[in-house]
Image (tube, rainbow, N blue to C red):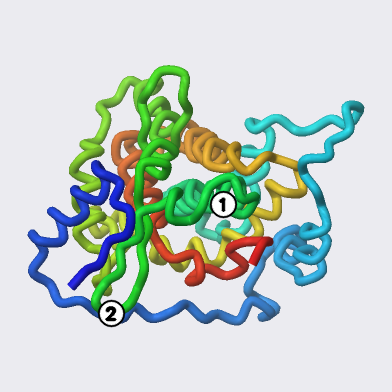
Amino acid sequence: MYSFKRAGIFSTAMILFALLLSKNTLADRLLINEDRNSKTYWQTDKAKLLDSPKMLEMLRSIDSKNKSNEEKIPTPKEVAAQITQLILAEQSSPEGVHIETILTTLGAMAGFSCQMAIRDGFVADGKITLEQAFAEVKTKSGEIFYTGPFLNECLISNTEGQHSVWGFVGGAVQQLKKPLPNLKEIIMRVSSRIGYDDYGTPDLPEKNMPKKTSEELLWKYWNISRNTLIVNKQPHMFWPYIYGLSAQQLMVLGKDTIDPTLASKIVMEAAIAMSKIDPKRIHAYSLHK
């Protein structure tokens, strides 16, 4: 039913065990197809510019490695704040903002950026092969998912001296003196849904569900947020940590609106799920394609 390539011991074994426990039927998941040129698709001129074909072509000509010593490069914290404000502006409405949806958006981008940082920062440069970078999981329906030690390190490492998405998200919870969610349970549950039509659907109370799925949110917002990173000349390996910082900023900002423990669960559910998906499912997933 499943085929594996270069199994990362921890993550792939966990995924296989979770898949064996699942009793649901595999399904072909539909690709997202929205009209990004609709006049009402974006709310801000900034998002329209960042999503434009002209912007994409311009960014492909930028060599982020050639930085002038005199040029002031924004700090990761400053760029994280830019992304937070961009998503807040795009998701605002007369009723305010739906914090669960924004947390899901930032989590999805944080997780996906782990995979893309490895692809664009190492595989595309020829430093490692795709097979060395990831363990490939192929479902009966033909959909491909990715996992492996490098993704785990970027997502959930708690090794001293190393940054991870979980480090920033969990750090916010601890800063606010709240209990951490059970990360192992989140990993197991997300992994058990690989290949099923409800993949990426979070295990949350109905009142706290995001307005769109994590994949729908990633499909919409990845291009404009990734382009923000490139405009600000952020190295690929900074990307996941900038999104982690952005999620951290929002969690602290919204601490009186949503319980930080629940907020961190929302972020990590989306991050883990979207770290594994086939990039080809996401609009403008890479400048290298």
* Viewer-proximal residue among 72 and 17: 17
Looking at the rendered structure, the kind of residue marked 1 is Val
Q: Residue at x 64, y 67 (%)?
A: 289
Residue 282 % position (x, y): 52, 68
156 shown above or below 190: above
Instruction: Residue under label 1, please give it.
Output: 123
**Res 243 quadrant in image:** top right
Regarding residue 256, the answer to whether it shows in the image is: no
Distance (Cα) linking label 1 and label 2 = 26 Å
Residue 104 % position (x, y): 42, 53
Instruction: Residue under label 2, please give it.
Output: 141
Give the crowd class for mark 1: few <14, some 14-19, many >=20 residues within 10 Å.
some
Q: Residue at x 27, y 74 (%)?
A: 197
162 on left or right of 1: right
Instruction: State if disc 2 and disc 1 touch (CB < 8 Å).
Output: no
Residue 228 % position (x, y): 70, 50
Judged from the image, the secondary structure of the residue bearing numbered disc 1 is: helix
Could you tell which of marks 1 and 2 lies nearer the N-terminus?
1
287 shown above or below 104: below
Q: Residue at x 84, y 30 (%)?
A: 72
210 shown above or below 168: below
Judged from the image, the secondary structure of the residue bearing numbered disc 2 is: loop
Give the crowd class for mark 2: few <14, some 14-19, many >=20 residues within 10 Å.
some
Location of the N terminus (image quadrant) = bottom left
Looking at the rendered structure, the kind of residue marked 2 is Ser
